[in-house]
């Protein structure tokens, strides 16, 4: 397994180009199952999870070809409508093929995802919605077996907003008979990107980005050319890299309009943030202690919580970070403590007392955003930090060491270490 070696203490200065959004590309790639003609997708990030879903689509029956700045995907026929546990244990987002497969060929067999490092992560809301659309679903030996000769539009109320649940049902409803109304739907920008893609394929989806989405089913969808939105969590992570190293970073090809809560929170800590239409400049100054609470969009994203904790661990005072989305998303705290952070956990709250400096140490990544947190901590810690198990990092950050090295970080990947 690879590890990352970081020498901390250098203020980062320069430009970083933000990649396409992992959490928009995943549902959009799954949605290619809904059409028989070719799709040309641009700005698809080169990430572990993206490679995984492309391989899965090929196994299902897609042809995937990589061109210079886009990929061409076509699913002329479904050869295999099963996604076994091998796929799901590698990537939970495999569940996103359930809705499209059911809509496309009337039958799907997808492994039930287990829990993961950040929580139990049930998917019952996905299954309840599909049953309301007429699917027959039963679970046996850890597999979801779903059948529906033709899905029927239905009113669906989510007891809690679920991002991939909203996406799964939006895709299923696109080819259903009649109208589906998703109430208490998730509002994340990645859902809007999926709706834009589906509408370009000929779907009739209104209200994406609000908590009420109306989908009028159509008889078929065509292929489309589409450019994936920028990754707001990658951009937010690099914003904090500029802040924590007291540097001056310009992030290009990002979308500040998706990032209001992250921008506001960072400004509250004392960083200067300059916004243009497609770029954000962060000038790190003081790091004031501020409280933070993760919430569904447009609140502070849970996917920024670990990174923000790294910043608060070197703030000028006491802050409280509250995680309201996942029940065990504080795995990075113990590792930050190994670097000298002063953090106390009380249920869903982490109480952080800023320390003058962190000290470099060997630390273990436990999940995608926890690994990003440890990279940020290493950038500012005194001495060398070794981040182990960075396969977690590679699932969601494209060429992170190249991007950070270009702006002055002393970071290198050591291949194949234990
Ligand atoms: C998506 O996960 C993202 N993944 C996550 O990003 C992100 O953290 C999460 O949304 C929240 O924003 C992708 O988009 C691929 P949820 P998802 O369903 O859809 C509960 C990353 O780092 N829930 O919105 O799985 C659930 O337990 C990843 O890129 C149910 O109770 O999240 C959680 O507490 C990590 N029953 C809450 O809802 C259900 O049927 C939000 O989960 C579904 C969800």
Image (cartoon, helix red, strand yellow):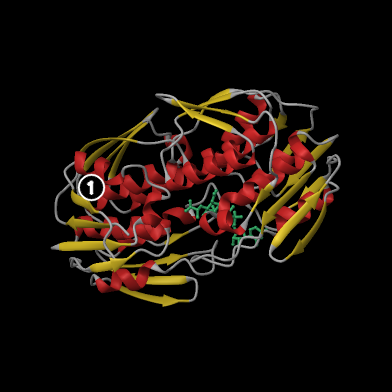
Q: Which residue position is annotated with label 1?
A: 284
Q: Residues within 10 Å of mark 1 (few under 14, many from 20)?
A: many
Q: What residue is at 15 percent from the left and 56 percent from the top?
A: 7
In the image, residue 396 sits, relative to residue 198, either above or below, namely below
Locate the N terminus and report the quarter of the image it occupies.
bottom left
Q: Secondary structure at mark 1?
A: loop
Please tell me in which quadrant of the rendered image residue 115 appears.
bottom right
Answer yes or no: is residue 118 visible.
Answer: yes
Judging depth in this view, the residue of 180 and 54 nearest the camera is 54
Please tell me in which quadrant of the rendered image residue 174 appears.
top right
Q: Quick check: 42 left or right of 388?
A: right
Q: What residue is at 79 percent from the left and 32 percent from the top?
A: 217
x, y percent for residue 366: 40, 65
x, y percent for residue 38: 61, 23
Please tell me in which quadrant of the rendered image residue 336 appears.
bottom left
Judging depth in this view, the residue of 292 and 83 nearest the camera is 83
In the image, residue 226 sits, relative to residue 409, either above or below, namely above
């Amino acid at each position: 397994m690879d590890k990352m070696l970081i020498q901390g203490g250098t203020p980062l200065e320069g430009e970083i180009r933000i990649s396409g959004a992992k959490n928009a590309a995943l549902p959009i790639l799954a949605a290619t199952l809904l059409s028989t003609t070719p799709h040309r997708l641009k700005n698809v990030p080169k990430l572990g999870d993206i490679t995984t879903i492309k391989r899965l689509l090929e196994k299902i029956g897609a042809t995937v070809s990589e061109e210079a700045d886009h990929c061409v995907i076509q699913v002329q026929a479904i050869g295999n409508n099963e996604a076994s546990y091998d796929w799901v244990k590698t990537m939970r987002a495999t569940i996103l093929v359930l809705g499209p497969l059911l809509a496309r060929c009337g039958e799907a067999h997808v492994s039930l995802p287990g829990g993961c490092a950040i929580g139990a992560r049930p998917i019952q809301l996905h299954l309840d919605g599909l049953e309301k659309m007429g699917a027959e679903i039963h679970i046996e030996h850890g597999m979801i077996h779903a059948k529906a000769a033709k899905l029927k539009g239905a009113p669906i109320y989510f007891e809690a907003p679920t991002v991939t649940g909203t996406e799964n049902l939006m895709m299923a409803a696109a080819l259903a008979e009649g109208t589906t109304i998703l109430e208490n739907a998730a509002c994340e920008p990645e859902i809007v990107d999926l709706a834009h893609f589906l509408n370009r394929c000929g779907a009739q989806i209104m209200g994406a980005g609000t908590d009420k989405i109306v989908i009028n089913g159509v008889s078929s969808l065509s292929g489309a050319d589409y450019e994936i939105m920028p990754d707001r969590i990658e951009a937010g992570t690099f914003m904090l890299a500029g802040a924590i190293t007291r540097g001056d970073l310009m992030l290009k090809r990002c979308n500040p309009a998706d990032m209001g809560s992250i921008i506001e929170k960072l400004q509250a800590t004392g960083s200067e943030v300059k916004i243009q239409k497609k770029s954000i400049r962060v000038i790190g100054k003081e790091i004031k202690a501020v409280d933070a609470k993760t919430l569904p969009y447009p609140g502070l994203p849970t996917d920024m919580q670990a990174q923000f904790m790294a910043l608060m661990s070197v703030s000028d005072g006491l802050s409280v970070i509250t995680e309201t989305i996942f029940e065990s998303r504080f795995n990075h705290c113990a590792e930050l403590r190994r670097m000298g952070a002063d953090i106390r956990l009380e249920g869903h709250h982490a109480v952080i007392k800023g320390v003058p400096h962190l000290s470099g140490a060997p630390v273990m990544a436990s999940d995608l955003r926890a690994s990003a947190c440890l990279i940020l901590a290493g950038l500012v810690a005194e001495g060398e930090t070794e981040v182990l198990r960075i396969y977690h990092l590679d699932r969601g950050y494209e060429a992170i060491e190249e991007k950070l090295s270009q702006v002055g970080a002393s970071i290198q990947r050591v291949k194949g270490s234990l």
